[in-house]
Image (tube, rainbow, N blue to C red):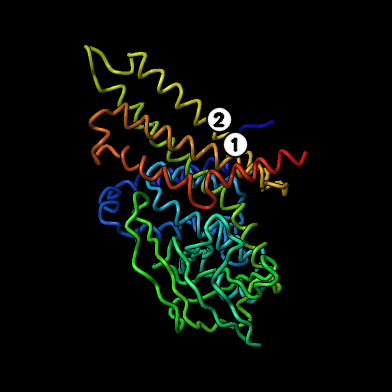
Amino acid sequence: MDFKLSEEQLMIRDAARDFAKAELLPGVIDRDNKQEFPTEQVKKMGELGFLGMMASPEYGGGGMDTLSYVLVMEELSKIDASCSVIVSVNNSLVCWGLDTYGNDEQKKKYLSKLTTGESIGAFCLSEPEAGSDATSQKTTAIDKGDHYILNGTKNWITNGGSADYYLVIAQTDKEKKHRGINAFIVEKGWEGFEIGPKEDKLGIRGSDTHSLIFNDVKVPKENRIGEDGFGFKFAMKTLAGGRIGIAAQALGIAEGAYELAKEYSKVRKAFGTEIMNHQAIAFKLADMHVQIEAARMLVYKAAMDKDNHENYDLSGAMAKLAASQAAMEVSVEAVQIHGGNGFVKEYHVERLMRDAKITQIYEGTSEIQKIVISRSILRD
């Protein structure tokens, strides 16, 4: 077992760390307060190659491994999880899905713009009655020969208002159940495609989340991804990789909160000494450090499983479950260590705590991860 990162991976990590401190930290509290989409920051991330890291260089991607992508997600998330979730969706769900399962024409038309940040993508699976139960798709795509007619509503869509291209999962044949589901590339501005109001969220408030409404949207047949009935498998395979990205986001949030708490403990005094000298605080920091390192091993292992072309359903689920739990628990303790200061925005930890919660919910709740894990271990 080799736990060392390569020189290239270290350079990528350091570049992301420097970018997060220089470009994301200034204004992060203001963007959170105003729920402001980080347009300029996203443009710069595209220029740095952060939006299409794992995609083929032929289509403008970086051709990098999953572990490098995880390192970038980790560093960005320490500072601004709103920006990192934009990176996650564009990389894991949109670019990777198109690069792996799209045809050459789809890649030339759409992927080459998504990898560079010229365009932004969104992944549209969740519905009012189909969140964790992805088989219960109410959105329909009726086959009309050379095109489909798309009708339905999608909820909780990251990049919902800012995206240019949307990967939409819809039911074509209800009798076939999940084998009758397809995935489509839909462009913003098509007739009948409406973007709902922006959600007012607890956390990741700089990321724009919307409902999407499709009213008789005409989708050309050439915009279907894969063969007829491939949509559910496409969604599940794509989400399995997406969970690694969200696990990395959770790991970064935990690390960011821990680092702030540790530094604060060195300067804040109580009872005549720095609070790090009080066992109550020192033990909290010790527990936080152990949780983070344990989560890190699971996240990096899942990334390496994917890079080694091994089945990563189990390792990805374990990584997301453990890292999201660490993010929530470590960020809560970071607020506690800061005391009253932890409850105000200028110290950042209250925002990290709010951002942490969503990592236990999106791209498969913690309960769904336990279903994946239990089914896997009970098959043995």
Number of other residues with Cα within 10 Å of mark 1, as a class: few under 14, some 14 to 19, many 20 or more: many
Residue at the image position 47 percent from the left and 77 percent from the top: 214
Which amino acid lies under the numbered mark 1 shown in the image of this protein? Leu
Q: In which quadrant of the rendered image does the C terminus lie?
A: top right
Left or right of residue 151, residue 27 in this image: left
**Marks 1 and 2, how far apart in space?**
7 Å
Q: Using residue 206 as the reference point, say whether residue 106 is left or right of it.
A: right
Where residue 350 appears, as percent x and y from the top left, is 31, 39
Give the residue displayed 55% in from the left and 40% down from the top.
321
Give the residue number, with chain letter if any, for mark 1. 298
| Vertical placement of residue 52 versus 67, above or below | below
Q: Is the residue under label 2 in contact with that under label 1 (CB below 8 Å)?
A: yes
Along the line of sight, the residue nearer the viewer: 58 or 253? 253
**Residue 150 lies in quadrant:** bottom right
Q: Mark 2 highlights which residue? A: 294
> Residue at left 29%, top 54%?
31
- Residue 210: x %, y % from top left: 40, 64
Q: Is residue 35 left or right of residue 313?
A: left
Density class for disc 2 (Cα within 10 Å; few <14, some 14-19, many ≥20) is some
